[in-house]
Image (cartoon, rainbow, N blue to C red):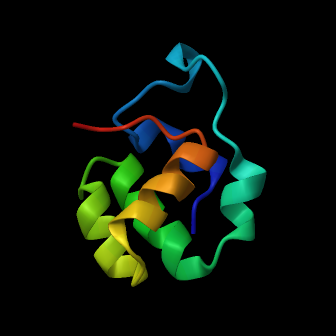
């Protein structure tokens, strides 16, 4: 489960973001999607792999990423 205390493990620095991550929205998602986002934010998997883990389409996962204001990792 995504927790703010884990932010030091992410590949991005939250202070560098134009808009802060929407943690409230992330916490409203199913646990499997939260887990997939957590791995993605840590840079351990791609957004495509995150969508596979969450069992949703790539497009849906990327839309969730955008709505949560999580930066894209390429």
The quadrant the C terminus occupies is top left
Residue 18 is left or right of residue 73, and the answer is right
Residue at 47% over, 66% down: 60
Residue at 40% over, 48% down: 41
> Residue most toward the bottom?
55
Residue at 47% over, 71% down: 35
- On screen, 67 above or below 58? above
Residue 58 is left or right of residue 3, and the answer is left
> Residue most toward the front?
59
- On screen, 5 above or below 8? below
Q: Where's residue 51, x and y in %?
A: 35, 71
Q: Where's residue 25, x and y in %?
A: 73, 56
- On screen, 52 above or below 19? below
- Quadrant assignment, res 56: bottom left
- On screen, 54 above or below 42? below
The quadrant the N terminus occupies is bottom right
The one nearer the camera, 49 or 12, is: 49
Residue at 24% over, 68% down: 49
Label total for image: 0
Q: Where's residue 42, x and y in %?
A: 35, 48
The one nearer the camera, 38 or 66, is: 66
Residue 11 is left or right of residue 16, and the answer is left
Q: Where's residue 10, x and y in %?
A: 40, 40
């Amino acid at each position: 489960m995504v927790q703010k205390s884990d932010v030091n493990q992410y590949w991005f620095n939250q202070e560098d973001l134009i808009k802060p991550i929407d943690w409230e929205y992330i916490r409203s998602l199913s646990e499997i999607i939260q887990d997939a986002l957590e791995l993605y934010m840590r840079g351990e998997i791609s957004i495509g792999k995150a969508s596979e883990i969450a069992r949703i389409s790539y497009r849906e996962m990327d839309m969730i990423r955008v709505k949560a204001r999580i930066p894209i990792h390429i």
